[in-house]
Amino acid sequence: MQWITAVLISLAAASAVSLGGWGITRMVMAENYDNEIGDHLERAGTANTVELALPELQIAIANIEARGLTHGDSTLIGKGSVQDDVGFWYANLKAVQGDLERLSADSTPHEKNLVLVKLKMTLQTVHPGGISIYPHNVGVAWWAWGSVAGVFGFLLLAIFADEWVKAHARRPYIIAD
């Protein structure tokens, strides 16, 4: 009967490893997002000139489009807020990109500053949560919850397995004449 406990503890350990794998996957996805999109958006948002902001925003938007982050909702359950609307975020970034591209050498410093402020406000106020793992956020969440449930479930089974087996072990039938 101790083998049952050993197997259940092994399964709990496997679930813990899976949870660690989830954490590593989440970190890698976040790092990839930062390298391809987040860092460029940050540089565009902190740029002091249109000439510095526009190329960074163009790189970020090209990577957003390559990843297909142009529509959807980044929440896990139900319909999220405007903050979680990936399409709204993308549309705002494209609108600011258009404004930056329409500026000419003849544009006044005031016009350029207004567009830069618009870019900074867009980046500060509209950014979907969980965008770094979108559109895989539901699968990643199920992976995490399944791993946590596996750890606790198998540990609880291991604790009570011996008692259950003893209580439910087959007893030989005695046939009375």
Image: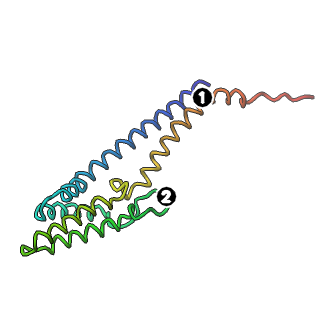
Q: Quadrant of residue 63?
A: bottom left
Q: Give the mark toward the camera: 2 or 1.
A: 2
The image quadrant where one finds the C terminus is top right
- The alpha-carbon separation of the residues under discs 2 and 1 comes to 33 Å
**Left or right relative to 167: residue 96:** left
Q: Position of residue 85 (x, y in %)?
A: 38, 64
Assess whether mark 1 and mark 2 are in contact (beta carbons under 8 angstroms).
Answer: no
Residue on which disc 2 sits: 77
Residue on which disc 1 sits: 159
SS label for mark 2 = loop
Furthest residue in direction top, as rendered: 2
Q: Quadrant of residue 157?
A: top right
Amino acid at the residue labelled 2 = Ile
The image quadrant where one finds the N terminus is top right
Q: Residue at x 22, y 51 (%)?
A: 35
Q: Residue at x 17, y 70 (%)?
A: 100
